[in-house]
Image: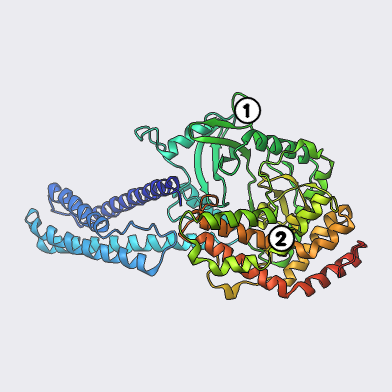
């Protein structure tokens, strides 16, 4: 996690804790007022009533703060969280009773004082705990898809400022941008960046989207004078990966301008199937300042993405989406699209880069990965299968997405159909074999991409067939016979390539991919290499699947 993310998380959690503290104070005051109106204060001097109120408030909230009852705000409540609250209130009752007894001289009737102290203390503690339970149950309800669940979600968004798009405990809907915070604070930096773009309304919400390995991404929500909510995607471009931002954004604009209104996906919407650029106030496609290069894009609302398929149909539709993307881009002049990352999917070149990193060994990590290095070296003769075919002209160079992970397809919340293809930074001249193989690498893997237990890693052939069917249904008619004949090897080559890239980044000191714990890139590499091993065993079955689909769609190719 970056320093900015940590700081943002602390601000969110601090804000929501004080919201809870405020609401508890209101409940305390209401309980005290009800106790007063019940007649328990008869013949007790006003000064005693006020003293008991102050003592009770200090006792209860002092105990809660001392025992850190507000450490978690019960969004993901557990028995431990509720026990912490109950313990704090128990201590508060004891403290209140002792202090109240000491000040009991304010009352001529000690019996009334005892009843007042004990009765109020128990009542407030039970009410507080009940509120916590209700609060937790409301969150449980919001996991559903019913109209009632949506109503409860809206209530929590309004009353508790909860940000349901965030997975961080304590994430709130509206970030307080305090004027007394230094201007260098990450939140104010982002606000200053946003102010330079031509968007509608005032910022009411900033949420970091912790997905993707390369760019830093934020969801921005604004409110216009008319009360309309607008949503945007703000990204800080990783200039280490994309040093030529002008070429990157030129590619991006050509792609989005061409596909807007043309790329039609099964769950398509009026706003189109690709994000569009929101320019700066001076008309530029991106902003460059001391903090880096930033761009603002439209945001797809009521949509979701998946890292792995939740059902076979999902992966089929991902194939349709990426296949449709490839087919629609055939009309763009390939000379207009620049290569922003040279040799991005040249597996042989990636392997040679790995050997250079091994020789340099900048972080002294090579000694710990000798087994992985040998696995890769044993297969070096297969790395140039696609790149050599491209170089010789055996297969055509096409404009491709080049990052066809499942999570780069957005699905509609209601219909669960694909509505958009996102993350267009790597749109470059390449081969659709790499796109196809990359989708299979991430989508057919039965484990996470950084799974430590390698026994869980394998290639799901059922999912393989679903994606192949969707992809070839969408673009099979534009692929050549030679491309179709190389297709069975595509997933093997690109999976090996990613294993090489993750291992190289681990050896180099984690300079390319974002990591969230030490050794994550090594875990990612080992997962890819284990998947390669399984794909090699299943290659005959993969070929048979493709033969069947080719026959169904009338595609001519000879797979040996």
Foreground pick, 458 / 419: 458
Residue 148 image offset from top left, x and y in percent: 57, 58
Q: How is the image coloured?
A: rainbow
Q: Nearer the viewer, mark 1 or mark 2?
A: 2
Residue ID at (62%, 69%): 375
Foreground pick, 126 / 74: 74
Query: With 237 as the anchor, is 127 left or right in this view?
Result: left
Residue ID at (38%, 46%): 15
Q: Mark 1–mark 2 contact, CB under 8 Å?
A: no
User: Can you say whether 372 is above or below 33 in the image?
Assistant: below
Foreground pick, 515 / 137: 515
Residue 479 image offset from top left, x and y in percent: 86, 54
Q: Is residue 460 visible?
A: no
Foreground pick, 381 / 541: 381
**Tag shown at residue 118:** none
Query: With 124 as the anchor, is 547 left or right in this view?
Result: right
Residue at disc 1, secondary structure: loop
* Mark 1: few/some/many CA within 10 Å (<14, 14-19, 20+): some
**Tag shown at residue 284:** 1
Residue 59 image offset from top left, x and y in percent: 20, 56
Occupied quadrant, residue 425: top right
* Mark 2: few/some/many CA within 10 Å (<14, 14-19, 20+): many
Query: With 47 as the anchor, is 155 left or right in this view?
Result: right
Q: Residue furthest front?
A: 359
Query: With 311 as the anchor, is 92 left or right in this view?
Result: left
Occupied quadrant, residue 63: bottom left
The residue tagged 2 is 383
Residue 168 image offset from top left, x and y in percent: 46, 55
Q: Is residue 550 visible?
A: yes
Residue at disc 2, secondary structure: loop
């Amino acid at each position: 996690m970056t320093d900015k993310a940590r700081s943002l998380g602390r601000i969110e959690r601090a804000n929501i804790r004080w919201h809870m503290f405020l609401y508890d104070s209101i409940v305390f005051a209401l309980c005290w007022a009800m106790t007063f109106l019940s007649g328990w204060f008869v013949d007790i001097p006003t000064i005693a009533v006020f003293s008991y109120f102050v003592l009770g408030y200090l006792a209860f909230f002092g105990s809660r703060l001392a025992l850190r009852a507000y450490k978690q705000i019960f969004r993901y409540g557990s028995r431990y969280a509720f026990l912490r609250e109950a313990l704090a209130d128990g201590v508060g009752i004891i403290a209140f009773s002792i202090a109240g007894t000491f000040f009991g001289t304010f009352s001529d009737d000690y019996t009334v004082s005892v009843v007042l102290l004990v009765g109020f203390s128990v009542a407030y503690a039970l009410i507080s705990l009940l509120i916590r339970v209700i609060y937790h149950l409301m969150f449980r309800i919001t996991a559903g898809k019913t109209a009632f669940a949506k109503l409860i979600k809206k209530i929590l968004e309004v009353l508790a400022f909860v940000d349901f798009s965030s997975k961080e405990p304590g994430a709130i809907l509206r970030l307080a941008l305090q004027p007394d915070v230094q201007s260098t604070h990450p939140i104010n930096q982002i606000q200053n960046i946003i102010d330079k773009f031509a968007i509608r309304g005032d910022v009411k919400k900033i949420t970091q989207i912790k997905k993707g390995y390369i760019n830093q991404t934020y969801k921005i929500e604004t409110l216009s004078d008319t009360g309309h909510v607008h949503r945007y995607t703000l990204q800080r471009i990783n200039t280490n990966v994309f040093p030529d931002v002008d070429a990157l954004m030129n590619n991006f604009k050509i792609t989005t301008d061409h596909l807007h209104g043309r790329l039609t996906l099964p769950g398509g919407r009026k706003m189109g199937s690709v994000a569009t650029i929101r320019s700066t106030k001076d008309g530029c496609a991106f902003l460059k300042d001391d903090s880096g290069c930033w761009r603002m894009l439209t945001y797809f609302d009521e949509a979701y993405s998946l890292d792995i398929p939740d059902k076979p149909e999902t992966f089929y539709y991902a194939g349709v989406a990426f296949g449709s993307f490839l087919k629609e881009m055939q009309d763009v002049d390939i000379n207009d699209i620049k290569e922003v990352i040279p040799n991005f999917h040249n597996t042989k070149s990636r392997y040679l880069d790995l050997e250079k990193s091994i020789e340099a060994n900048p972080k002294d990590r090579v000694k710990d990965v000798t087994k992985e290095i040998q696995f890769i070296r044993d297969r070096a003769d297969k790395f140039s299968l696609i790149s050599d075919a491209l170089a010789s002209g055996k297969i055509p160079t096409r404009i491709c997405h080049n990052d066809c992970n499942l999570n780069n397809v957005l699905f509609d919340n209601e219909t669960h159909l694909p509505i958009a293809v996102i993350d267009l930074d790597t749109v470059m001249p390449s081969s659709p074999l790499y796109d196809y193989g990359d989708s299979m690498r991430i989508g057919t893997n039965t484990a996470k991409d950084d799974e430590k237990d390698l026994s869980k890693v394998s290639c799901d052939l059922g999912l393989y067939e679903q994606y192949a069917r969707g992809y070839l249904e969408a673009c099979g008619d534009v692929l050549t016979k030679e491309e179709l004949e190389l297709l069975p090897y595509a997933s093997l080559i690109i999976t090996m390539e990613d294993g090489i890239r993750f291992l190289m980044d681990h050896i180099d000191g984690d300079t390319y991919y974002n990591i969230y714990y030490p050794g994550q890139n090594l875990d990612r590499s080992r997962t890819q290499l284990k998947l390669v091993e399984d794909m090699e065993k299943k290659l005959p079955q993969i070929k048979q699947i493709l033969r069947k689909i080719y026959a169904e769609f009338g595609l001519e190719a000879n797979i040996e």
